[in-house]
Amino acid sequence: MPLTSAVIAVAFMLLLGLLLAAVLAIANKQLFVYEDPRIDDVEDMLPHANCGACGTAGCRAFAERLVQGELQPGKCTVNSKEMNQAIASFLGVELGNHEKRVARLACAGGNHIAHVHARYSGLDTCRAAALISGGGKGCTWGCLGFGDCATVCDFDAIRMDRHGLPVVDIGNCTACGDCVDVCPRDLFSLHPVSHRLWVACNNPEKGDAAEADCPVLCTGCGRCAADAPEGLIAIEHDLAIIDYSKNKLASRLAIERCPTGAIVWLKDGSGMQKGKEAIRIVRKEALPVG
């Protein structure tokens, strides 16, 4: 009797195993999702930055959409043009063209220009300082200078200059947007490199008190709007606003009469260029606190 029970148990387990194997085989066939082997090859040719500048969640997702024909290789502005061309040749598609975007900072009030009325003591982060009366900086709209943006950047595209202002290396910038997210004063935004005309200020206030705190703020005087092609620049809340849908009309003419140099022309290799009537800042050292 015990032997018979053992045989039955073994037979039952054998049948159960065969039944489960059959179920798994059927499920595998029904649920199988084909993945194009070219995806792995394309992913290997991408920079593995996973920066999101192409609009996808990462290089793997970008490779999938390239193989599916939904995007073109030129959409990746981090990869070299030669490698993007290699991907296009491999897939037999057009390279496509996508203008590189970079982070821009809407502030020029470094510590040698903008006044600080109280010494901040606490965590050396912009977010912490922003919670404590703005770290004592007179301009409540300006850069706090603790470098949260440089810390969060994984591509070494941001460094802090001697005046406590972030400087973006457009060669390394991938437009990932991390600096945009981390800045408590919303001073960063992402722009195509062709956006040369730029307002380096985000302060909508005007008057003697505001200018005393930062002499390079936008005063909303309207000279740039008057000199620029019609509709390119508007003054809203005492701040110059550029309509980049008319970017082809932009020229240096709009910056020449700006008295504070708040509106600038951006040029690769030479940074911000101010107009001929802009105030000249000669001080190199930080202003005293108070």
Image (cartoon, rainbow, N blue to C red):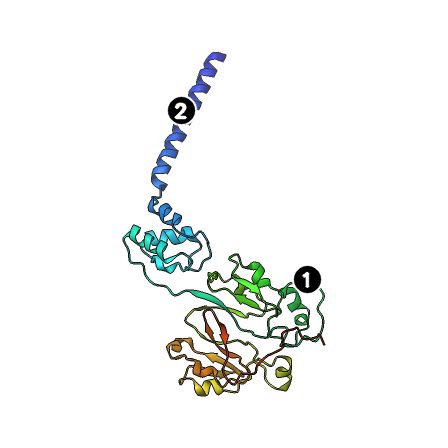
Q: Is residue 51 above or below residue 259?
A: above
Circle 2: residue type: Leu
- Residue placed under numbered mark 1 in the picture: 123
Tell me which residue sits at (42%, 81%) in the image: 232
Q: Residue 246: x and y, percent? A: 39, 78
Q: Is residue 137 above or below residue 78?
A: below
Q: Is residue 31 left or right of residue 121?
A: left
Tell me which residue sits at (36%, 49%) in the image: 42
Circle 1: residue type: Leu
N-terminal-most mark, 2 or 1: 2
Farthest residue in the left direction?
92
Q: Residue 168: x and y, percent? A: 51, 66
Tell me how many marks there are: 2
Q: Is residue 80 above or below residue 272?
A: above
Q: Residue 5: x and y, percent? A: 47, 16
Tell me which residue sits at (33%, 55%) in the image: 85
Residue 182 appearing in the image? no
Quadrant housing residue 26: top left
State the SS at label 1: loop
State the SS at label 2: helix
Label disc, if present, on residue 15 of the rendered structure: 2
Give the foreground label among 2 and 1. Answer: 1
